[in-house]
Image (cartoon, rainbow, N blue to C red):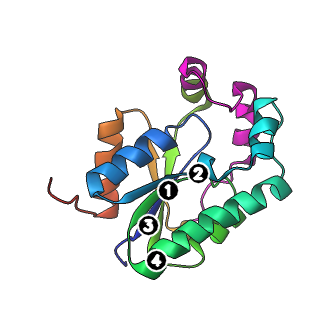
């Protein structure tokens, strides 16, 4: 297996993608990109009003994230990006067939994630959309080589689990 140059942290909203992605990037000394930053204002407004995005809404967003990944690979600058990547075709588009892009799925049950969403403040994503996220989530197929990580531990424990599963060594501080 090729060492990852980009790690994509995936999962439903509220699973901890932003927290885990940022902490993972910090531990590795890599660049970090939050997928929400790639959304159009129209997409954010739609989600804020409680309406799920369609595949057509998501496509420009996914392409922008894929371009960020491709840029990292082209210049040899490793990075971590968080993105829901709920469907197989989304994950295929994001990875672009590159073995250097590894996916990590943050795995948690609906009750745990719903509780987290109720506790978070100031996020545009309506907790009412959680069911649509779980409905859209396509479990990874074995050929996708996705590392599934439970979200039952602390963020630090989850990142340590990811680093061990991917066999990636953090840079010394």
> Does residue 65 lie above or below 23 as drawn?
below
| Mark 2 neighbour class, 10 Å CA radius: few under 14, some 14 to 19, many 20 or more | many
Given contact means CB atoms under 8 Å apart, are the residues at marks 4 and 3 in contact?
Answer: yes
Q: Residue 47 location in percent, x, y?
A: 77, 36
- Disc 1 versus disc 2: distance between alpha carbons? 7 Å
User: Dot 2 corresponds to which residue?
Assistant: 35
User: Dot 4 corresponds to which residue?
Assistant: 73
For marks 4 and 3, give the one nearer the viewer: 4
Given contact means CB atoms under 8 Å apart, are the residues at marks 1 and 3 in contact?
Answer: yes
* The magenta segment: 115-141
> Does residue 103 lie above or below 159 as drawn?
below
Q: Residue 82 location in percent, x, y?
A: 52, 51
User: Dot 3 corresponds to which residue?
Assistant: 6
Q: Quick one: SS at disc 4? A: helix
- Disc 4 versus disc 1: distance between alpha carbons? 13 Å
| Mark 1 neighbour class, 10 Å CA radius: few under 14, some 14 to 19, many 20 or more | many
Q: Quick one: SS at disc 2? A: helix
User: Dot 1 corresponds to which residue?
Assistant: 81
Along the polypeptide, which appears first: circle 4 or circle 1?
Answer: 4
> Does residue 99 lie above or below 34 as drawn?
below
- Disc 3 versus disc 2: distance between alpha carbons? 14 Å
Q: Residue 7 location in percent, x, y?
A: 44, 62
| Residue at horizontal 64 percent and vertical 70 percent from the top | 92
- Disc 4 versus disc 3: distance between alpha carbons? 8 Å
Q: Among all residues in the image, which is located at the extreme left?
A: 172
Given contact means CB atoms under 8 Å apart, are the residues at marks 4 and 1 in contact?
Answer: no
Relative side of 44 to 101, left or right? right
Reply yes or no: does residue 137 show up in magenta.
yes
Reply yes or no: does residue 125 show up in magenta.
yes
């Amino acid at each position: 297996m090729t060492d990852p140059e980009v790690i994509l942290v995936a999962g439903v909203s509220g699973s901890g993608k932003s927290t885990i992605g940022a902490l993972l990037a910090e531990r590795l000394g890599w660049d970090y990109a939050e997928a929400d930053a790639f959304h159009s204002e129209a997409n954010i407004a739609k989600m804020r009003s409680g309406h799920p995005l369609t595949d057509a809404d998501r496509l420009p967003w996914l392409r922008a994230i894929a371009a960020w990944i491709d840029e990292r690979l082209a210049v040899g600058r490793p990075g971590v990006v968080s993105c829901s990547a709920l469907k197989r075709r989304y994950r295929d588009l994001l990875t672009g067939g590159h073995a250097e892009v590894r996916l990590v799925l943050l795995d948690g049950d609906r009750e745990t994630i719903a509780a987290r969403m109720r506790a978070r403040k100031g996020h545009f994503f309506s907790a009412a959309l959680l069911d649509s996220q779980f409905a859209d989530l396509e479990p990874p197929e074995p050929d996708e080589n996705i590392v599934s990580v439970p979200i039952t531990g602390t963020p630090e424990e989850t990142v340590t689990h990811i680093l061990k599963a991917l066999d990636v060594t953090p840079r010394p501080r």
